[in-house]
Image (cartoon, grey):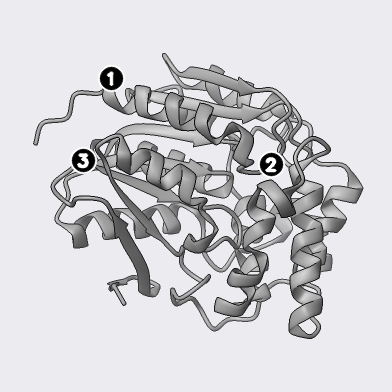
Amino acid sequence: MAKFKAGCGDIYFEHRGARANPRVLFVHGLGCQLVQWPDSLIDGIVDAGFCAVMFDNRDVGLSEGPSEPAPSVEALLAARDNPSGLTPTYTLSDMAGDVAALLDHLGQGGAHVVGLSMGGMISQRLAIEHPERVYSLTSIMSSTGNPDLPGPPDEVVGALIMTVGGGDTETIIAQNIQAAKVFGGPHYDSEVHGIGRFARIAVERAYRPESVMRQLAAILTAEDRRGDLAGLDVPTLVIHGNADPLVPVEAGRDTAAAIPGAEYLEIDKLGHDLSEPVIGDMVEAITSHLRAVEVSR
């Protein structure tokens, strides 16, 4: 197993593709593990001539995290209206520091960075705080932290809470599949086409609901990044689905508007998911974006 030591402890990572090729670093979303990236997405990037690097964010999967108690569901719900009342165990900036540490471990001055959902937020912070490490940024179904953006409806928040509900293994797997189906929206069944397909392998590999709550605290208490994003000089692609119930499409449009020169791809019928019928379009957009960036090697 490939691990390296970061400030939070050991971080687990994997490569796919020739290591001599330009690196593309994939940063996953809330509570997600590297096994929840679809092969069609990763292999599409690798087949285009890149080396994919996936890792478990701190506190999930096979990566280590803190031992402090997680915030309660009640505290997290209250923080939606009053984030100042919640103190996170770690921040998005801390998680961006883990990504920089991974680049150090790999001996890489930088990489193309693809961030999904919370991973997009982490990647934005990496580009803000370590712009020289980010050759290009792809932010997928993510947000700037703009407090004026619409949030998810109550039933979607309820589905998120369901993922930390506990129970026996089969109950937990069923809860995670149902939540993925809600997040994926009405057009593509996540259990068939999306991240819901990976619920069993993820739960059996490492089920850590307290980690989801700590990561959610980092999201809820994060500052509005628009001012910092306006100063970026990083080639950026923003991808968002117009049927996203968890991070509504307005957040994608806001992200693209905040970053100078950002390209924007809005995918019809895509929810908060990596749905197989649109993976080809995503791979095409990402690889075109990466190839347009000249990287000295």
Left or right for 193, reference 152: left
Tell me if mark 1 has few (under 14), some (14-19) or many (20+) residues whose alpha carbon lies within 10 angstroms of its own: few
Instruction: Give the percent coordinates (x, y) of residue 43.
Output: 39, 46
Looking at the image, residue 107 lies above or below residue 232: below
Q: Where does label 2 land, which residue?
A: 272
Q: CB under 8 Å between callouts 1 and 3?
A: no
Q: How many marks?
A: 3
Q: Amino acid at mark 3?
A: Pro
State which quarter of the image contains the N terminus. Answer: bottom left
Q: Residue sitting at 66 percent across and 58 percent down?
A: 197
Q: Which mark is residue 292?
A: 1
Which dot marks residue 22? 3
- Residue 143 figure quarter: top right
Do callouts 1 and 2 mark residues in contact (Cβ within 8 Å)?
A: no
Residue at the spot 81% in from the left edge and 83% down from the top edge? 167
Comes first in the chain, label 2 or label 3: 3
C-alpha span from label 2 to label 3: 28 Å
Mark 3 crowdedness (10 Å alpha carbons): few <14, some 14-19, many ≥20: many
* Residue 81 visible here: no
